[in-house]
Image (spheres, grey):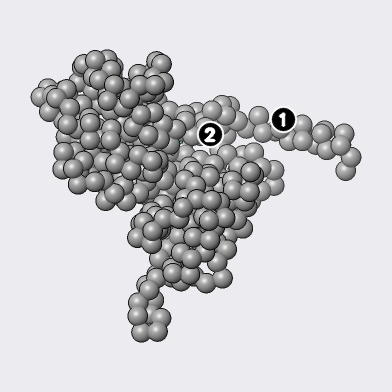
């Protein structure tokens, strides 16, 4: 087919597509629906915030739930209603983008902070936010290892001013990593967002379809919901993306749309990893042996090649369990020469990991 014919064909196809789609923004992961599907766990948080509004005494919270379980959406939606209906301030920061305490304060202050010390920023924060304030720290597990102690948690939880911290994370790991002093002054109440069931995913999809599509088939929505709950950790993103592909990919059967959506999400997940974690995953993906000790040696070699100091074995191991908790690898205990050790299984495609790692590390 020549270019002109191809262009004509694609144009026709896009025409068909826009006949099916009313509003593409429903496929955007940042889209905030007017009426999100309710999560029971949110009630507890709402109650806590209302109590905090009255008493000024915060109970900090740590919300853990797998990817696509609606943590971010629920906080953004709560921010809307809480600010409209209570006297609380609610601040939201994503620690993926603001990945140190300094950057978080700086972001929340929104003005020039170059040259200031962390303590100075904290004092400016105290002066700026005098009201009862809920501080949401999304993806707190992605804070940089430069800020291992996550000072902001310690500072805010020790403050005499009324601040309630809500941290969100895909991995329960972050709570274990907090140092003892922070943990004891924070004492976060753990709140677990359970994985959605097929019915809830179906409801989420129906809501998007109602708003964004001209016509759809309930059977297809149910099938997507079933696939998503059966074959991912009920990741609503995979479901939404599958729906998108099912209306925009010509001739794609549902399974292909689903596989493609799932692959996209893995790419996002791997790209989100810190350099060190990606390096570990890269070692796993390319190692001829799946034994932890062998992988550690390989990881050390990779780090040295990048002129990075490798983690100690203990710290390496803790990053490995992080990768496990976000669902990229599995650890299986096994007996080798009469002692127990772990085998590491990659749960995504090795070729995807290898090519993303090359992109990141072999550029410079
Ligand atoms: N209860 C819900 N109602 C409507 N849409 C939802 C719901 N939960 C999740 N979603 C949608 O699924 C996608 C993933 O949700 P998100 O909040 O980003 O998950 P997480 O932060 O837990 O990884 C987003 O596009 C979000 O709008
Ligand atoms: Mg999120």
The label shown at residue 61 is: none
**Which element carries disc 1, helix, strand or loop?**
helix
Residue on which disc 2 sits: 27
Q: Residue at x 52, y 72 (%)?
A: 289
Relative image position of residue 223 (x, y in whole percent): 50, 50
Image position, residue 87 (x, y; %): 21, 16
Position of residue 27 relative to residue 342, above or below, is above
Spot the residue most to the right. 2
Q: Are dots 2 and 1 in contact, CB under 8 Å?
A: no
Q: Nearer the viewer, residue 131 or 122?
A: 122
Residue found farthest to the left: 55
Q: As displayed, is residue 327 above or below residue 27?
A: below
The percent position of residue 229, horizontal first and vertical second, equals 43, 52
Q: How many marks?
A: 2
Which residue is painted at 46% across and 37% down in the image? Answer: 206
User: For mark 1, what is the residue?
Assistant: 15
Q: Is residue 60 in sight in this rendering?
A: yes
Q: How far separated are the C-alphas under marks 2 and 1?
A: 18 Å
Q: Picture coordinates of residue 354 (x, y %)?
A: 60, 56
Q: Of 258 and 100, which appears nearest the observer?
A: 100
Task: Say which quarter of the image contains residue 151.
Answer: top left
Question: Which quadrant of the rendered structure holds the N terminus?
Answer: top right
């Amino acid at each position: 087919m020549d270019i002109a014919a191809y262009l004509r064909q694609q144009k026709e196809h896009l025409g068909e597509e826009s006949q099916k789609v009313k509003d593409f923004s429903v496929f955007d992961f940042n889209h905030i629906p007017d009426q999100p599907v309710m999560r029971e766990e949110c009630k507890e948080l709402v109650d806590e915030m209302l109590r905090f509004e009255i008493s000024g005494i915060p109970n900090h919270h740590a919300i853990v739930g797998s990817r696509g379980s609606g943590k971010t959406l629920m906080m953004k939606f709560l921010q809307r209603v809480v600010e409209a209906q209570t006297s609380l301030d609610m601040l939201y920061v994503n620690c993926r983008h603001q990945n140190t305490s300094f950057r978080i304060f700086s972001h929340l202050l929104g003005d020039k902070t170059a040259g200031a010390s962390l303590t100075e920023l904290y004092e400016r924060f105290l002066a700026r936010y005098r009201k009862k304030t809920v501080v949401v720290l999304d993806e707190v597990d992605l804070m940089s290892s430069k800020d291992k102690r996550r000072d902001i948690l310690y500072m805010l939880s020790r403050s005499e001013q009324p601040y309630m911290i809500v941290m969100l994370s895909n991995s329960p790991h972050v709570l274990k990593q907090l140092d003892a002093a922070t943990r004891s002054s924070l004492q976060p109440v753990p709140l677990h967002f359970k994985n959605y069931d097929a019915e809830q995913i179906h409801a989420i999809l129906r809501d998007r379809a109602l708003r964004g599509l001209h016509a759809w088939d309930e059977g297809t929505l149910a099938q997507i919901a079933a696939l998503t709950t059966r074959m991912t950790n009920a990741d609503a993103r995979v479901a939404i993306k599958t729906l998108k592909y099912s209306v925009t990919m010509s001739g794609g059967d549902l399974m292909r749309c689903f596989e493609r959506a799932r692959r996209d999400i893995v790419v996002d997940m791997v790209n989100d990893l810190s350099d060190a974690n990606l390096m570990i995953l890269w070692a796993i993906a390319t190692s001829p042996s799946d034994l932890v000790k062998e992988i550690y040696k390989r990881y050390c070699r990779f780090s040295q090649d990048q002129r990075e100091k490798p983690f100690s074995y203990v710290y390496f191991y803790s990053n490995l369990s992080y990768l496990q908790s976000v669902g990229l690898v599995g650890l299986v205990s096994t007996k080798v020469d009469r002692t127990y050790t772990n085998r590491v299984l990659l749960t995504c495609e090795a070729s995807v990991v290898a090519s993303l790692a090359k992109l990141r590390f072999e550029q410079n």
